[in-house]
Image (cartoon, grey):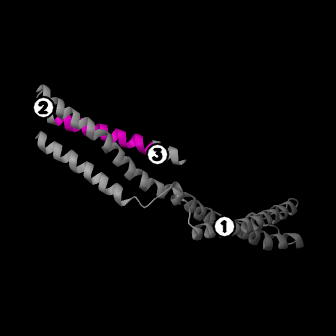
Amino acid sequence: MILILTLIVSLVWIWSEFKGFLCRNTKSSDDFNLTNEETRELREFQRKERAIKGSLARAKNKVASLEQLGIGVRRTRTGNFDRRSKLGKKLNKELPRARALALRYQNQQSEIQSEMELFAALPEARASIWVATEARRLSNRMVLPVFAAVLTLDAIFDYRIADYWFVLGVSWLGVLLVLRKTQQKSLMRKLGY
C-alpha cells in the first residue's frame, strides 16, 4: 500500500508541475490587468455613468420641485392631486412622468455600475486562476521532500510506516491542502487582491 501511496504522491506532484507549466504564459503581474480594449470599454461606461448621474440628478430635482409645488394642493382619496385646479392637473400630468424618468435613469445607472464591477473583477479573476495553479505547485514542492524524508527514515530505522499507510496518506493530503490554501492567500495578498 505504501508503494501505491508513493505513486499517488508522485503523480499528483507531476500533474501539478505540468499544470504549472501550462500556465506559464504570465510574465508579470501586469498581465492580469485590463487589456487596452477593456480599458477603452471601461472608460466608455464611466463616461455614460457621468452623463446618467447628471440626468438622474436633474430628474430627482424636478421630482422634488414638483412635490414641493404640490404641498398646498388638495388630494383625492387615490392620492392624486385634485383636478379642479390648474396646478393639480399639471402635477398629475408631470409628476408621474418625472418619477418614471428618474426611475429609468436609476435603472440605467445600476446596469452600468454592474458592468463596471465586472470589469473591476476581471484582473482578480485572471490572477486567481494563476494563483490556484501556482499554489498547488508550490505546496506539492514543499510536501514532497517531507514525504520522501519520512519514507527514507522508515527504510533506515525500520519504523514500520507501512502499517500506518492510511494515516500517512491522510496526513499528506491534509498538509497539502493547508499549504495550498496558505499559499493562495499569500500570493493573492502579494498581488494586492
- Distance between the alpha carbons at the discs numbered 2 and 1: 64 Å
Secondary structure category for the residue under label 1: helix
Secondary structure category for the residue under label 2: helix
Residue type (three-letter) at the residue carrying disc 3: Leu
Point 13% across, 39% down: residue: 2
Q: Say above or below: 162 vs 112.
A: above
N-term-proximal mark, 2 vs 3: 2
Point 20% across, 32% down: residue: 150
Mark 2 or 1, closer to the camera:
2
- Residue 130 found in image quarter: bottom left
Instruction: Describe residue 62's horizontal placement relative to residue 34 as left or right.
Output: right
Give the image location of residue 181, x and y in percent. 39, 42
- Distance between the alpha carbons at the discs numbered 1 and 3: 29 Å
- Distance between the alpha carbons at the discs numbered 2 and 3: 36 Å
Which region of the structure is painted magenta? 166-185
Residue type (three-letter) at the residue carrying disc 2: Ala
Disc number for residue 43 = 1
What crowding class fits label 3: few (fewer than 14 Cα within 10 Å), some (14-19), or many (20 or more)?
some
Quarter of the image with the N terminus in it: top left
The answer to whether any part of residue 85 appears in the image is no
Point 17% across, 34% down: residue: 151
* Residue that carries the numbered disc 3 in the rendered image: 187
Give the image location of residue 156, x and y in percent. 13, 28
What crowding class fits label 2: few (fewer than 14 Cα within 10 Å), some (14-19), or many (20 or more)?
few
Is the C-beta separation of discs 2 and 1 under 8 Å? no
Magenta stretch contains residue 172: yes
Residue type (three-letter) at the residue carrying disc 1: Arg
